[in-house]
Amino acid sequence: MALALWLGSLLSSCWQNLSILGVFLTVFTLVLDFMKRRKKWSRYPPGPVSLPFIGTMLHVDFRRPHVSFRQFHKKFGNVFNLQNCWTNVVVLNGYQTVKDALVHKSEDFADRPYFPVYEHLGYGSKSEGIIVAKYGPIWKELRRFTLSTLRNFGMGKKSLEERVTEEAGFLCSAVESEEGKPFDLRFLVNNAVCNVICTTVYGERFNYGDETFKMMLHLFESSLNEETGFLPQLLNVLPILLRIPGVPQMVFRGQKVFMDFIDVLIEKHMETWNPAHIRDFTDVFLTEMKKGKEAEERGFNYNNLRLVTADLFIAGSETTSTTLRWAFLYMLLHPEIQSKVQAEIDKVIGKEKPPTMKDQVSMPYTNAVIHEVQRCGDIVPVGLPHMTYRDTEVQGFFIPKGTTVITNLSSVLKDETVWEKPNEFYPEHFLDANGQFVKPEAFLPFSAGRRACPGEQLARMELFIFFTTLMQKFTFALPEDQPRPWEDGHFALTNAPHPYLIRAVPR
Ligand code: HEM
């Protein structure tokens, strides 16, 4: 009996001690969490209520962040703060705010946050590619190299424009073989755009029916989907979860297989590289790598070769092909605009000659339509995340060094203070009273400042040549039995149209 009483009192005192410890630990973690989330700066931007541990993450719909941001923009103004667990995030909205940050304080906003979720693909301190690289000498060197190699394109016999024109010809034949029946233009356009990147970067193009290529495009699409939603955001801010065996492989399976595909292309290049016969971007990069230790320190190492070329593929294919899919969708929905584009093509280029970039200057209406497609399609609505490189200010708000900054490009492209009809497809946004092409400064689909898209020139060329070549040869119509396609997009890093069927009637 005495033993039982003694055991009972021991248990009760243990339990009491455990309870005290539990209360102490809870209070301690809550205080720690509060300290981490506390904003000790005056003039820090306002934002929604931040909850313990999770911060404001439950307030944001990560499947459609631009929609959540629109609501916060209305409530808190042009600069507001969010908190992803303990990561401070500031969102910039509207043309003036984004310009002040990216153009006037370009270097302050030139850094990128660290993305632990990419480590399993080979990203590390000495190999960061371009897109997610920290602001510094290696990023500068690789970006400069990429820009000049793409611009000069001194390899191979064909200029970049000739390659795009040739691919536009293949695309036309593929569309023609649909014989005016309903089909989904997505696969062919995707194929054509990816071929431009593939020939430029890896010297290879794939036939439109090629099974490997189809598989790769499918993988690529799932890779983008893997990046959206709550889980990837959580893994980025709580990277410890990535240490759980199998988690990165499970969540980012498509990305891993996609990188394996790129590795095969690179291995092939390494085996066949010949300095006397440089074939493509990969060969130029390999030539730099062969320069030895000094080149390696400037960033030209094997891992960067796979990451930089993958970056070009990732950044250069989905963006351009999605924009083209918006373009044909808007033509379906606005047949009168389609007719005006075709009339201008017939007048300036004629019915037979393939379009060239020289024609663009004499085609203000078509040019305005393409720009309006980019504005209205709004394909990179929340841009890519930036990070402050030093303590800075924007619109009177203080933003400390190391803050993740989202430039809400959607709020710029649809800024009510700039655009006459922000939510309508209205090519006149880009025409003056005399019908001449004008480009308002708030046209920032490629972003601005030091991190602005280095592929803009190539993208412009592809958009103009693919669009005019198809419009020269076909009239696009909605199949009779099809419902009117939706005008709002589906977000997976880019804002893409929902799938739709189309008829391409030869002209
Ligand atoms: C319509 C087509 C395109 C659009 C709308 C687009 C848009 C963008 C945007 C918004 C950014 C983020 C800029 C920032 O961080 O502020 C970006 C970055 C980038 N884009 Fe594009 N892009 C397009 C096509 C291309 C093409 C064709 C290429 C390459 C061949 C390319 C390569 C890149 C790269 C490498 C970056 C990262 C730049 C850096 O971090 O320094 N893009 N693009």
Image (cartoon, helix red, strand yellow):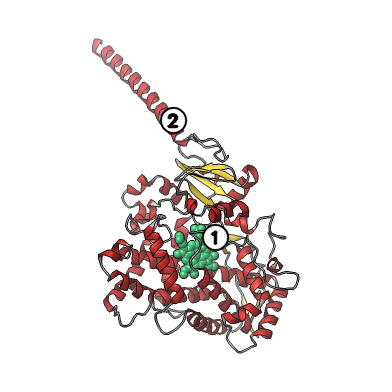
Q: For the residue marked with disc 2, what is the amino acid?
A: Leu
Where is residue 172 drawn, in percent x and y? 55, 83
Where 487 sits versus 168, above or below? Answer: above
Q: For the residue marked with disc 1, what is the amino acid?
A: Ser
Which residue position is annotated with label 2?
30
Q: Nearer the viewer, mark 2 or mark 1?
A: 1
Where residue 141 is drawn, which disc sits there? none
Please, what secondary structure does the residue beneath circle 2 have? helix
Crowding near pointer 2: few (<14 within 10 Å), some, many (20+)? Answer: some
Q: Residue at x 42, y 66 (%)?
A: 144
Q: Quadrant of residue 140?
A: bottom left
Nearest to N terminus: mark 2 or mark 1: 2
Residue in front for this viewpoint, 186 or 417 = 417
Q: Is mark 1 within 8 Å of ligand 1?
A: yes
Q: Is residue 22 visible?
A: yes
Q: Residue furthest top?
A: 2
Residue in front for this viewpoint, 342 or 144 = 144
Q: Quadrant of the N terminus?
A: top left
From mark 2 to mark 1, how far is it between C-alphas?
39 Å
Where residue 447 is drawn, which disc sits there? 1
Where is residue 286 drawn, in percent x and y? 31, 72
Q: Quadrant of the C terminus?
A: bottom right
Q: Residue at x 69, y 85 (%)?
A: 347
Where is residue 270 drawn, in percent x and y? 28, 74
Q: Residue at x 33, y 82 (%)?
A: 277
Residue in front for this viewpoint, 362 or 231 = 362
Where is residue 162 drawn, in percent x and y? 49, 83
Where 288 sits versus 123, above or below? Answer: below
Q: Residue furthest bottom?
A: 352
Residue in front for this viewpoint, 34 or 130 = 130
